[in-house]
């Protein structure tokens, strides 16, 4: 059937870049508050509402809610002898306290405890337990805001705006944080390290960074003596400054040079870092007090695993790492290292908080529902389960396919029921990301479509996670091969995995759904404009699509470090234009496409999704639908509360209809 989509009046506006005349017929959709745009968005949402059978949608939402797992606590800390934690709930968070056995939960903070504010984590002041620091986001704000609260009086003492993170002093009622001022016109960022004293209401600037860091953070060391300020020049290069808390003296550890480093902690006046400066997989460095990184000693040389983090517990140093795209943790000591056992072979491990005597982790895998682990230095035990289900009939394999870009072998995970055979008809859900030095790791739920992966497999489907270049799964080289002038490697990698699945007889294009969000939204938007015949369905969440104008966005200076600046040179402009989804939509037949964005998105402005949807609806010559869902209060996510359940229910029903399930 032909769809009568809402029409938006096209503009004849065009711009010239390096001799190219570039039309922008839907440029007005960038004006979010323009009455014409608001009316068009309203019509698009109503069109999407009508497309779905509302009873079927309501039933699907009820089904998904009934299947949701118990939420696990994250951001665990201590407060007055109790644990504090963040509890995810329907796309929002609750901040709670509970006893050491994780019982007797008490609510401290939730959505709209402060109007229009979503809290995400809480930290108690170590030296004055009545003081609490709440991290969160006001609706529509581009950066986090921090509320400093008197827990006895239940009053907000102060608000620190526009910062990406903060830390309490371990010795006094002082908050340390970095604020960064971005200038999208000048393409610059300026950062400073600040100290705010709660009781005197005084602010001190400890240092001003002379570099052009896209953001910064500051951590207080476990030995309670040092602040470590981190300035991020791009998504893999950092500069560090060690600041003594008492004297305020500053040591420029990096000597002005951005390096591929990550600070772990400080033990006995020695700073420990993971470095990928001289190794792509990572080595452990130690810098003695007063010395610079040029004088660092290698404590653990590069091996076969990719180092991705570390922590100190009871005076011992632990490293977390990826061993062939799966989690591993070891204790590093002078006489060698000891591996700490984890619950499953393939899995993802993330630090969920620390107290004085324990570290907490979340662990999950494709067929292993998330658990909260407690590690006291001797034992790693399961402290909490999200589900009692197990899936012995689900097989997880790690396989390889040649990239269409250059033939490089690209890993991918394939999840299926044991008895599923390659008959060419299996519904196959493929996820990819490929960017920003961020790994795609085994998870139990596909976050884009809210898909329970083990359940999908038990119903006869195949789930695939492609390990694309641009991520950090195999070190810094893997990231660099998927950024800037190598960005199109990500797309060739994905095509290679898709073609291998088809060639091996598992599926066919009409049975393939691809999904991605943010940079992954750019990925699937690009894939469907390059090879629309290769897919049956696309779930496209909060995507970048206009890669010529993203530099004008509030976070443009940050994204330039990953994609490059199309205004900088003819070569970069032409390269980015060659894959920019909005500019590569043609008059042709496209598969079913569901595009979702949020009006309050502080990472990727919603005009990207709107412009892409308008262009796709105009040009699509097939009978497959192109739907746009704009969440009025949605941010860089799938919404919260009922909006979240509706979004993922729509995505899953859309896939069901597109693949004929």
Image (cartoon, rainbow, N blue to C red):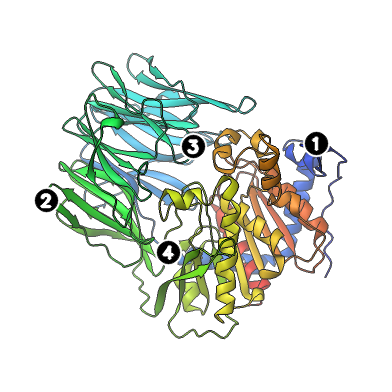
- The numbered dot on residue 234 is 3
Mark 4 or 2: in front is: 2
Q: Secondary structure at mark 1?
A: strand
> Of discs 1 and 4, which sits in the foreground?
1
Q: Pick the quarter of the image with the N terminus.
A: bottom right
The earlier-in-sequence mark between 4 and 3 is 3
Instruction: Give residue 16's mark.
Output: 1
The x and y percentages for residue 356 are: 19, 40
Residue at mark 4 to residue at mark 2: CA–CA distance = 37 Å
Q: Earlier in the sequence, mark 2 or mark 3?
A: 3
**Mark 1 residue crowding within 10 angstroms, few (<14) / some (14–19) / many (20+):** few
For disc 2, the marked residue is 335
Disc with the residue nearer the chain's start (4 vs 2):
2
Q: Residue at x 61, y 33 (%)?
A: 554
Badge 4: how crowded within 10 Å, few (<14), some, or many (20+)?
A: many
Q: Is residue 103 above or below residue 34?
A: below
Residue ID for mark 4: 444
Q: Mark 2 and 3 residues: CB-CB less than 8 Å, in contact?
A: no
Precedes in sequence: disc 2 or disc 1 = 1
- Rounded to the nearest angstrom, the CA distance separating label 4 from label 3 is 30 Å
Residue 271: quadrant of the picture = top left
Closest to the observer, 121 or 339: 339
Depth check: give the residue in front, 97 or 500.
500
Instruction: Work out which residue is located at the far left of the displayed protein and give it.
Output: 335
Q: Earlier in the sequence, mark 1 or mark 3?
A: 1
Q: Is residue 18 left or right of residue 462?
A: right
User: Which comes sooner in the sequence, label 1 or label 4?
Assistant: 1
Q: Residues within 10 Å of mark 2 (few under 14, many from 20)?
A: few
Q: Secondary structure at mark 2?
A: loop
Quadrant location of residue 430? Answer: bottom right
């Amino acid at each position: 059937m032909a769809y009568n989509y809402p029409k938006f009046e096209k503009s004849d506006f065009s711009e010239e870049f390096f001799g190219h005349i570039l039309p922008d017929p839907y440029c007005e959709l960038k004006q979010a508050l323009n009455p014409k745009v608001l009316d068009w968005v309203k019509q698009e949402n109503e069109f999407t509402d009508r497309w779905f059978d509302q009873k079927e949608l309501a039933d699907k939402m009820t089904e998904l809610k009934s299947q949701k797992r118990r939420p696990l606590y994250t951001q665990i800390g201590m407060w007055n002898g109790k644990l504090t934690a963040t509890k995810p709930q329907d796309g929002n968070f609750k901040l709670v306290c509970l006893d050491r056995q994780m019982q007797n939960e008490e609510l401290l903070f939730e959505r709209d405890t402060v109007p229009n504010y979503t809290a995400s984590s809480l930290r108690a002041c170590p030296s004055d337990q009545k003081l609490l620091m709440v991290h969160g986001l006001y609706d529509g704000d581009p950066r986090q805001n921090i509320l400093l609260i008197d827990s006895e009086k239940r009053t907000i003492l102060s608000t620190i705006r526009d910062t990406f993170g903060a830390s309490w002093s371990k010795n006094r009622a002082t908050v340390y944080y970095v604020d960064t001022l971005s200038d999208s016109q000048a393409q610059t960022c300026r950062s400073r390290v600040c100290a705010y004293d709660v009781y005197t209401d005084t602010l001190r600037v400890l240092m001003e960074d002379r570099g052009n860091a896209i953001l910064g953070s500051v951590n207080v060391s476990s030995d309670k003596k040092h602040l470590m300020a981190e300035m991020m020049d791009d998504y893999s290069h950092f500069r560090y400054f060690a600041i003594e808390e008492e004297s305020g003296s500053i040591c420029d550890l990096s000597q002005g040079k951005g390096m591929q480093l990550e600070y772990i902690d400080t033990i006995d006046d020695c700073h420990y870092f993971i470095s990928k400066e001289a190794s792509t997989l990572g080595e452990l460095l130690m810098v003695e007090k007063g010395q610079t990184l040029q004088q660092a000693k290698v404590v653990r040389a590069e091996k076969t695993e990719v180092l991705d983090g570390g922590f100190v517990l009871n005076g011992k140093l632990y490293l977390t790492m990826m061993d062939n795209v799966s989690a591993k943790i070891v204790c590093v000591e002078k006489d060698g290292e000891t591996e700490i056992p984890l619950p499953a072979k393939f899995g993802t491990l993330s630090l969920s908080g620390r107290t004085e005597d324990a570290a907490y982790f979340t662990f999950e895998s494709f067929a292993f529902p998330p658990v909260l682990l407690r590690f006291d230095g001797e034992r790693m035990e399961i402290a909490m389960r999200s589900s009692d289900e197990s899936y012995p009939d689900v097989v997880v394999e790690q396989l390889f396919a040649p990239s269409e870009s250059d033939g490089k072998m690209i890993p991918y995970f394939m999840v299926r029921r044991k008895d599923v055979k390659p008959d060419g008809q299996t519904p196959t859900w493929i996820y990819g990301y490929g960017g920003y030095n961020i790994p795609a790791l085994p998870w139990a739920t596909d976050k884009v479509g809210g898909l329970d992966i083990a359940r999908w497999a038990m119903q006869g489907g195949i789930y695939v996670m492609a390990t694309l270049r641009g991520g950090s799964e195999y070190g810094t080289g893997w990231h660099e091969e998927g950024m800037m002038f190598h960005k199109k490697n990500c797309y060739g990698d994905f095509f290679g995995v898709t073609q291998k699945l088809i060639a091996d007889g598992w599926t066919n294009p009409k049975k393939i759904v691809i999904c991605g969000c943010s940079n992954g939204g750019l990925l699937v938007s690009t894939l469907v404009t390059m090879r629309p015949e290769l897919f049956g369905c696309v779930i496209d969440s909060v995507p970048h699509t206009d890669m010529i104008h993203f530099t004008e966005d509030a976070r443009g200076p940050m994204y330039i470090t990953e994609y490059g600046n199309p205004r900088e040179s003819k070569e970069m402009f032409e390269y980015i234009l060659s894959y920019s989804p909005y500019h590569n939509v043609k008059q042709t037949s496209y598969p079913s496409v569901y595009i979702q964005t949020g009006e309050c998105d502080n990472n990727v402005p919603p005009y990207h999704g709107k412009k892409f949807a308008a262009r796709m609806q105009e040009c699509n010559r097939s009978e497959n639908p192109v739907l746009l869902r704009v969440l009025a209060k949605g941010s860089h996510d799938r919404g919260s509360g009922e909006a979240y359940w509706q979004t993922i229910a729509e995505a899953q029903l859309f896939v069901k209809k597109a693949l004929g399930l």
